[in-house]
Image (tube, rainbow, N blue to C red):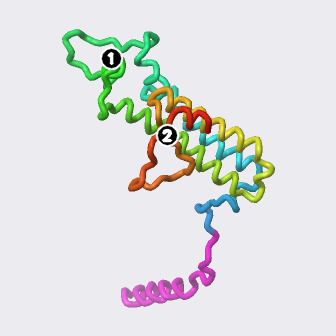
Amino acid sequence: MNKHIKIMMGLALAGSLLAGCTKLDEERFGNLSAETYYKTEAEALSSVAGVYQKLSYSADINDWFRVNEFGTDEFIVPGRASGGWFDQDNMDIMAHNAKPGNLRLANAWNLVFSEIGTANAVLANLEASPNKDNFKALIAETRLLRAYGYFYAMDMWGNVPLVTVARIDPNNLPVTTARADVFAF
């Protein structure tokens, strides 16, 4: 009896392998390009919404907006005179004594330039779209959002790199650009 069951299972397995799919080409949905995605205004608008999503970090506790206020009298970080607590490098910023390893400033830098990089990627895709003439308002809006990021970057750090591409080569980092040139951009 066991022998017959093994033979039947073997035949069933062989039959299922022989009856497998013959059309193995599949339609891929994970790869989007400007030519395939940016066809309608709704699709283009959804990518611009991604830039606005990056701006949502300005309301986070680790935000770049709050870092801008730390050095003013609008914001205070309470503490204990005896220490014993971690202020997340806020006191250094408030005392205008921030060092290069300040995590709060590094996070603010990364958030601002993440927003600028996202805007650059959206601009590149909108301008590469075959329907770019229909997206003039969205292109202008995305340029404004990128300029908003540069405004805060200049306000916090002065001369900053002027990056107009979505991705930069980490082995060839851009140099800083004077405020006047970034502002004129």
Mark 2 or mark 1: which is in front?
A: 2
At a point 57% along the width and 47% down the height, the residue shown is 164
**Distance between mark 2 and mark 1 Cα atoms:** 27 Å
Compare residues 123 and 20 and report the one nearer the observer: 123
Tag of residue 95: 1
Image quarter of the C terminus? top right
> Which x, y percent locates residue 2?
36, 86
Residue 10 lies within the magenta run: yes
Compare residues 4 and 28 and report the one nearer the observer: 28
Determine whether the residue tagged by mark 1 lies in a helix, strand or loop: loop
Tag of residue 51: none
Q: Is residue 135 visible?
A: yes
> Which x, y percent locates residue 95?
32, 17
Q: Where 103 sits versus 124, above or below?
A: above
Determine whether the residue tagged by mark 2 lies in a helix, strand or loop: strand
At a point 76% along the width and 53% down the height, the residue shown is 132
**Residue at the disc numbered 2:** 177
Q: Is residue 88 visible?
A: no
Residue 21 lies within the magenta run: yes
Q: Which residues are magenta?
A: 1-27
At a point 46% along the width and 30% down the height, the residue shown is 158
| Most common SS among magenta residues | helix
Q: Where 89 sits versus 79, above or below?
A: below
At a point 58% along the width and 85% down the height, the residue shown is 19
Quick one: label 2 or label 1, which is nearer the N terminus? 1
The answer to whether 70 appears left or right of 148 in the picture is left
The residue type indicated by label 2 comes to Thr
Mark 2 crowd level (few <14, some 14–19, many ≥20, 10 Å Cα) = some
The residue type indicated by label 1 comes to Ala
